[in-house]
Amino acid sequence: MSGLPKSTHLFLTVIWFATICVTWKERNNRVFQNTAATSSTLLEKVKLNSFLWLKPNQTTLAYTYYDWWKHPLHYMGVFL
């Protein structure tokens, strides 16, 4: 994460935890309920969870879920 703004570290940490949470829940669904979601569905769940976890704590950021879904790196301060 070197070279990235310090504010980006929080975003990446939350995205990491959202990914772990979604992966763990999907694993449980596959093992105990014999169901499986597509990879695109899992990605959408990660995006939604990370947005819902970040938005209440980042009151200075004015963006919608659609904005976050479309351009998450932009809102983390990462410009490629």
Image (spheres, rainbow, N blue to C red):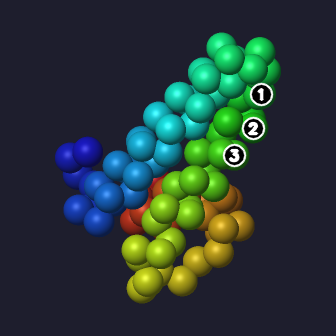
Residue drawn at x 23%, y 51% is 3
**In the figure, residue 46 lies in which quadrant?**
top right
Q: In which quadrant is the N terminus drawn?
A: top left
Q: Which residue position is annotated with label 2?
A: 41
**In front here: 37 or 74?**
37
Q: Residue at x 20, y 46 (%)?
A: 2
Residue 30, position as x, y percentages in the image: 69, 18
The residue that label 1 is drawn on is 38
Report if residue 26 is visible in the image: yes
* Occupied quadrant, residue 8: bottom left
Tell me, yes or no, whether the two marked residues, 3 and 2, touch with CB atoms within 8 Å.
yes
Secondary structure under the numbered disc 3 in the rendered image? helix
Whether the residues at callouts 1 and 2 have beta carbons within 8 Å, the answer is yes
Identify whether 52 is placed above or below 3: below
Q: Earlier in the sequence, mark 1 or mark 3?
A: 1
Residue type beneath disc 2 = Thr
Q: Residue 61 placed where, x, y %?
A: 47, 80
User: Do we see residue 74 in this rendering?
Assistant: no
The amino acid pointed to by label 1 is Thr
Q: Are marks 1 and 3 in contact (CB under 8 Å)?
A: no
Provide residue 20's location: percent of width, then percent of height.
47, 34
Q: Is residue 15 left or right of residue 47?
A: left
Q: CA distance from mark 1 to mark 3?
A: 10 Å
- The 10 Å Cα crowd at callout 2, few under 14, some 14 to 19, many 20 or more, is few
In the image, residue 62 above or below residue 53? below
Disc 3 target residue: 44
Q: Nearer the viewer, residue 4 or 42?
A: 42
Q: Place residue 64 in its image quadrant.
A: bottom right
Relative to 52, say whether 4 is above or below: above
Q: Determine crowd level at label 1: few under 14, some 14-19, many 20+ residues with C-alpha closer than 10 A.
A: few
Q: CA distance from mark 1 to mark 2?
A: 5 Å
Which type of secondary structure does the marked residue at label 1 adopt?
A: loop
